[in-house]
Image: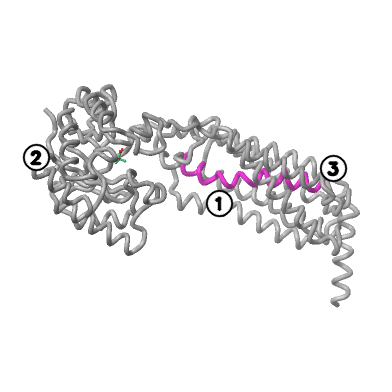
Amino acid sequence: MRHTLAHFAKLYRSGERLVMLTCYDASFARLCDQAGVEILLVGDSLGMVVQGHDSTLPVSLEQMEYHVAMVARGAERPLIVADLPFASYQASVEQAFTSAARLMVAGAQAVKLEGGRAMADTVRFLVERGIPVCGHVGLVPQSVHQLGGYRVQGRTEDSARELLEDARAIQQAGAAMLVLEAIPAALAKQVTESLAIPTIGIGAGGNCSGQVLVLYDMLDIYPDRKARFALLIMGALNVAFFFLVTRTDFIDVLPPSLRPFLGFYLLVYAGVALVFFLPIYLQLGHRVSAQLSGLLLLPITVGQVTASLTVTRVVRRMRDPQRIPAIGMSLSSAALLLLGLLPPHMGLVIGLGFVTGLGFGTVMAINQVVVQTAAGRARLGAVTALNSLARSTGGAVGAALFGALVFAIIPDADRQSLLQRASEYDVELVVRAFHHGFLFIAALAALAALTASRIPRVTLWKQQVENDERRVMNDE
Ligand code: KIV
């Protein structure tokens, strides 16, 4: 037995959420029916997800009839709502009736049309002639060119008020339900509370009477190409830019003895880039909340600040201060090695995060000071800029490599929806992927330690210490 609108009115009154999915063919219709989906929308979104167009505008009424008939053959129980496609209902109420009637004959039990007050008479005309209507306000894709793109609607006070009036007009005209697409959650809540018919949200927050999803979005089937190598390409572009700059005369501002510092710094910051991904690791691998994942980055930062402060204080008293960066990076490398090898544990993330931060902190402050001191005043600006370039390049390359490695292990994770679909990810897989990432960064840090230990910097340190001492004596 097919579900009726009366059934959904009852569910709505009892406070139960309505579930709507788009569907375009008989096989999926059968699967959706078996899965318990109660409303199937034969959406004109098929123009994009099935036909490959970049909007819904080219979809014809004949094509909609064809898809509605398939869905009706495949699904026994769901209520079938069919989209009136672009240019099949806007010209007149008579045109709307003729088009809607064809979709009903093809197998739909209701039609959906886009628009607010301007469409109220059309909705009334159809309803009075026995055709149930679902309204659609907010982002109305058939008006994409008038809206200037697929943008969230109702953001300003005026447009929110207009949208509310549109929704009321459609309800008053007799619509059975109303789709709210891409509007702020607070506005969707306000509309839902002020109507006596169910609202079905898509990109409108969680406070609507029901939700609709485009089936192909839900199943992650996209006609667009995946940017699988985007991270690596961005990393490579950064490296190319770095070499381009450092091959110009610009590099001459840096004394030859300081040039290895750039490579060292690049490696250090490639390691630091791991911090960008830690919140994802904590949220997906340890199932902590978004807020807590941010808070748990604190030990790393505290480690960095502690090390920077301590090192800058003790450096003048040390005999072999040039060892500091090598020791620091060895410390970070060891902590990351343990993070990658030991079983996942929140205490370890906090403790070893602190140690990793300590290691990085020894280097960050010192490197800048050493390079600037050794370069001298005249070249101060240029060497600082070069140092920053090495730092940003390192960060970009580290993020690219770490991201590419980790996301190559988690299938289909090169998508922005990774966190949105957090519940679908296998915790063990995520942990394994990130642990590989930690080991990779541990290797980078070890390489940085090795590079640091080979940089002949003793004169530089002496020079810096002497400068400092001279300044202190002058002050005294
Ligand atoms: O055509 C469609 O799929 C739709 C949904 C986005 C509501 O109208």
Q: Are marks 2 and 1 in contact (CB under 8 Å)?
A: no
**Would residue 472 be found to the left or right of residue 205 on screen?**
right
Q: Are marks 3 and 1 in contact (CB under 8 Å)?
A: no
Mark 1: amino acid: Leu
Magenta portion: prevailing SS class:
helix
Question: Helix, strand, or loop for circle 3?
Answer: helix
Where in the figure is residue 476, as x and y percent of width and height?
Answer: 86, 77
Q: Quadrant of residue 233?
A: top right
Residue at left offset 47%, top offset 51%: 292
Image position of 340 with respect to 386: above or below: above
User: Is 474 in the magenta?
Assistant: no
Residue behind mark 2: 130
Classify mark 2 as within 8 Å of ligand 1 or not, answering yes or no: no
Q: Which residues are magenta?
A: 260-285
Residue at left offset 56%, top offset 34%: 406
**Which tag is nearer the camera, tag 3 or tag 2?**
2
**Would residue 174 be found to the left or right of residue 288 on screen?**
left
Question: Helix, strand, or loop for circle 2?
Answer: loop
Give the CA separation, mark 3 to mark 2.
85 Å
Question: Helix, strand, or loop for circle 1?
Answer: loop
User: Is 283 in the magenta?
Assistant: yes
Where in the figure is residue 169, as x and y percent of width and height?
Answer: 18, 55
Residue behind mark 3: 454
Where in the figure is residue 248, as x and y percent of width and height?
Answer: 82, 47
Residue nearest the viewer, comparing 293 with 421: 421
Which badge, 3 or 2, is on the more N-terminal residue? Answer: 2
Ligand 1 shown in quarter: top left
Residue at left offset 45%, top offset 53%: 291
Give the CA separation, mark 3 to mark 1.
31 Å
Mark 3: amino acid: Arg
Mark 2: amino acid: Gly
